[in-house]
Image (cartoon, helix red, strand yellow):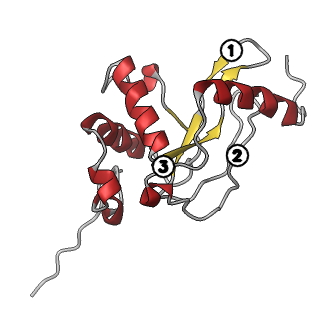
Amino acid sequence: MARYKHKNKGRFAGIPVHVIDSSNYKSLSGNAAKLLTILTRFYNSSNNGDLAITQSIIGEWMKKNTMYSAKDELHKKGFIVINAYGGRSAWGRKLPSLYGLTFYPINELKGKDGELRYAHYDEGRTHLNYWAKGINPDYKTKKERDAQYKKDIKRIVKTNTHY
């Protein structure tokens, strides 16, 4: 009997089965589960911790308020973490927060467009698996996140003098 050799013809969005089978995943709202699927669509095995959730990226799939409430739910329940907090850059540009999926290892955060960011999770760290407990021990309110970004700016060693 001949064996059929299946070749993957492209990328796919994957959530591990043990995550989907968990009661915490089953407790997610439909919009939160949808946003998690969209985030895995942008994950490419080398950019975990560098995923942005912005209207310009996610707007094709969901409305702004729906996206923000789904993001907050995923963050509170430990499916995602903030690797780099967002705010205004030295050049006046608004930088988005960068997220990581807790069921995959966090990757190195690479600077883009001369921007320096402070990463809160080390590269190569094993899966955080906060989703398994259903709570994110690193969760911060909006006010706390804004304060954290200001602290992060001070932590960054300014090696780039590009203006």
Drawn side of residue 17 relative to residue 56, left or right: left
Question: Between residues 93 and 71, which one lies in front from this camera angle?
Answer: 71
Between marks 3 and 2 in the image, the one whose residue lies nearer the viewer = 3
Decide: few, some or many residues near mark 2? Use Cα within 10 Å; few <14, some 14-19, many ≥20: some
Q: Secondary structure at mark 3?
A: loop
Q: Is residue 17 above or below residue 82?
A: below
On the image, the x and y values in percent for residue 56 come to: 45, 20
On the image, the x and y values in percent for residue 4 come to: 17, 75
Counting residues from the start of the chain, the first of labels 3 and 2 encountered is 3
Q: Secondary structure at mark 1?
A: loop
Q: How many numbered markers are drawn? A: 3
Q: Which mark is residue 78?
A: 3
Q: Quadrant of residue 96?
A: top right
On the image, the x and y values in percent for residue 24 come to: 34, 54
Q: Amino acid at mark 2?
A: His
Q: Is residue 150 above or below residue 106?
A: above
Give the labeled residue for mark 2: 120
Q: Is residue 62 visible?
A: yes
Question: Between residues 156 and 4, which one lies in front from this camera angle?
Answer: 156
Q: Is residue 97 above or below residue 103?
A: above
Counting residues from the start of the chain, the first of labels 1 and 3 encountered is 3
Q: Residue at x 23, y 73 (%)?
A: 5
Q: Residue at x 45, y 33 (%)?
A: 72
Decide: few, some or many residues near mark 1? Use Cα within 10 Å; few <14, some 14-19, many ≥20: few
Q: Which mark is residue 93?
A: 1
Q: Quadrant of the N terminus?
A: bottom left
Q: Is residue 86 visible?
A: no
